[in-house]
Image (cartoon, rainbow, N blue to C red):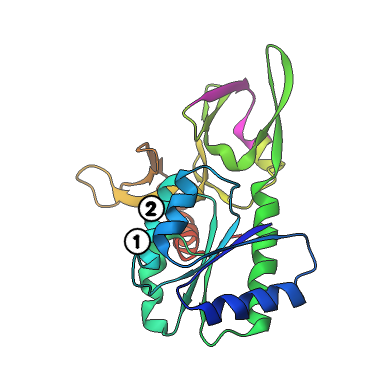
Amino acid sequence: MNIAICDDDLRIHKKLTAIIRQEITFPYRLTSFSDGEALVMYFHENKVPLDVIFLDICMDKMDGIIAAHQIRALNPSVMIIFLTSSPKHWAQGFNVQALDYLLKPIKADKVVALLAQASEKLESQQATVLLKNERGLFRARVNDIMYLESKARWVTFYFRNGTSHKECNTLASFIEAWPSSQFYRIHESFFVNMSYAYSIERTGSLSNNKSLAMSNGQVLPISRTRFDGVFATFTKQQKGDLL
């Protein structure tokens, strides 16, 4: 697991580093940043991908919320744990899907629990599904799939890089063995990776017609009977509670 600490307080760096070195038993790589600008630049330079970031909300150069929004545009899957001295800042992280918040002063048991949660989520992100094309079978990373659409016995997979893949099968057959809990069936025809869900919107003039806007601009219909479940799942995802 590639872990980063971004805080302009050296004491926080030392505290977190000591806890991770003493308590974490799985393999990890630790990188440190003293401000949000340096962290964002790291993503622009396409260096070793980060899995988890401990990100301070209040910093002098670029605060954590601004940095998180810029990072999300570059990497939608990296897990962000905000560092803060006050719960009043928690609401600011809603739109960047923070995994959780770590309240200062930092406690070792909370750090260990959050990294265990992150490890579980990382395993889910690395899951693959077996698909087939004219050349044979191939594996696709589940986290790269934005959503599945079913139409006339064909299921189309839409990937975050803009490509798609079509197979003759039923949507139910894929859902039954799907290896990730981050997907939700929002409609009879759509099975969606909620990590890429951007907002829930009203469609047309009728307030009871709802749709799900995706991060790529695509707007997908939500079945009326599924709306409550979609709303609850979307809210959890935005808060960072969905594994």
Q: Residue at x 59, y 60 (%)?
A: 52
Between 34 and 84, which is closer to the camera in this rendering?
34
Q: Quadrant of residue 79?
A: bottom right
Q: Are marks 2 and 1 in contact (CB under 8 Å)?
A: yes
Q: Nearer the viewer, residue 127 or 26?
A: 26
Residue type at numbered disc 1: Ile
Three-letter amino acid code at disc 2? Gln
Density class for disc 2 (Cα within 10 Å; few <14, some 14-19, many ≥20) is some
| Residue placed under numbered mark 2 in the picture | 70
* Quarter residue 59 falls in: bottom left
Q: Residue at x 63, y 29 (%)?
A: 170
In the image, 135 versus 108, the foreground residue is: 108
In this view, the residue farthest toward the bottom is: 105
Does the magenta-highlighted stretch encompass residue 17? no
User: As drawn, which residue projects farthest toward the left?
Assistant: 205
- Magenta region: 163-173
Tag of residue 66:
1
Marks 2 and 1, Cα distance to the nearest angstrom?
Answer: 6 Å
